[in-house]
Image (cartoon, helix red, strand yellow):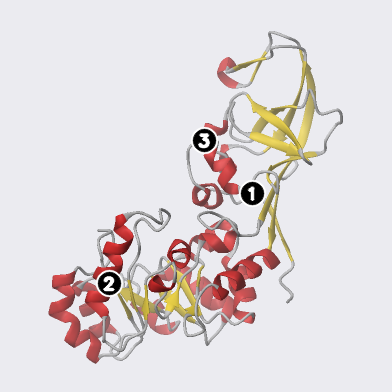
Amino acid sequence: MATASLRIDLDAVLANWRALDKMTASATETGAVVKADSYGLGAAHVARILARAGCRKFFVAAAEEGAAVRQALGEGPEIFVFSGHMAGDTEMIGDLALTPMLNSLEQVTRHFEALPGAAFGVQLDTGMNRLGMEAAEWQAVAPTILGAGPKLIMSHLACADEPEHAMNASQLAAFRSMTEGLGVPRSLSATGGILLGADYHFDVTRPGIGLYGGLPWEGSQSVVTLSLPVVQIREVQAGETVGYSNSWTAPKDSRIATLSAGYADGLTRRFSNNATLYCGATPCPLVGRISMDLVTVDITDLGETPKSLDLICPEQGIDALAESVGTIGYEILTALGARYQRSYAGGHS
């Protein structure tokens, strides 16, 4: 079966990083979130192009991800692990010079006992109730932790995608209260926080989705093109059905293209009878039920016989596609499966 192709524009990733970097003061360092294999787009490729452009701080979710990034980058850049120092991670953290963002007293104890003198950071909870030490716990252990010289203190905004949300100001105030005057570099903002303005930038920012062409930053360049090859085209008579469960009935004589990709490739079944694909600028509705390896598309009005159709493209970015099925661009990207033939454009500047 023909393979669907996923094209990643590394020049667009780099342009997005540089643009986000310019939104902050010169004293603020811009890092990059490359967790989940750079949101499914290839952390090794992304990290290398950003490192060549001057990015020195990279953020991952787990130590195993940090190991892959370290292998791609070699020594030098800092790699921060959001999940902290988990049981079983000691050897990896120590050997690869990863910087765990310690989230609890248990992790502090583990890190200090297992890797005394090794780099670490601290994650604080300012109201999201997900990861990090709360104010009382932090107050109790701060003297000990600060004496060991943390590389970074961070927290995470819960509602940065909504600029007017009261939670933003509340978390900012809490973060300042917990960290003011400590003399340690601080980080509060991912992409959404960068857009909130200078009060939220502190010493280090951590853009993620904005690098890869997603909201909330409307100015980001498109990074991904996903093209699905046509396996077969058939004539369907009015009244005939297409796909599993007879979920679509042809309202007239129609031409239906069967394309190579399905839910095994991360195309959610919610796309069934909802999503749109494109042939150039011409929209073509997806009809029938998404199956494991195939989707069917109505090309009756196309006027040509395409070799492939695009699901993600300039005419339909990841957030527009996500909106059609009530999700977010993050989910669209991170669900993209391993069977796509990935190719990379740019990345030489």
Image position of 213 (left or right of 106): right
Q: Which is more N-terminal, label 1 or label 3?
A: 3
Q: Amino acid at mark 3?
A: Val
Residue 105 at what x, y percent from top left?
A: 19, 74
**Can you say whether 260 is above or below 184 in the image?**
above
Report helix, strand or loop for mark 3.
loop
Q: Residue at x 52, y 78 (%)?
A: 70
CB contact under 8 Å: marks 1 and 2: no
Q: Choose the circle earlier in sequence order: 3 or 2.
A: 2
Residue at 75%, 42% in the rendered image: 2
Can you say which quadrant of the picture contains the C terminus?
bottom right
Q: Is residue 110 visible?
A: no
Quick check: marks 3 and 1 in contact, CB under 8 Å? no
The circle on residue 175 is 2
Q: Position of residue 61 (x, y in %)?
A: 41, 65
Q: Residues within 10 Å of mark 3 (few under 14, many from 20)?
A: some
**Amino acid type of the residue tagged 2 in the rendering:** Phe
Sequence order check, earlier mark of 1 and 2: 2
Q: Position of residue 192 (x, y in %)?
A: 45, 61
Label 1 vs label 2, nearer the camera: 2
Q: Amino acid at mark 1?
A: Arg
Residue that label 1 marks: 339
* Residue underneath mark 3: 325
Q: What residue is at 38 percent from the left and 73 percent from the top?
A: 199
**Residue 190 point in image, percent of width and height:** 44, 66
Q: Residue furthest top?
A: 239
Comparing 203 with 10, the one in front is: 203
Please tell me whether mark 2 sits on a helix, a strand or a loop: helix
Image quadrant where residue 293 sits:
top right
Tell me which residue sits at (57%, 64%) in the image: 211
Can the viewer see residue 127 in this picture? yes
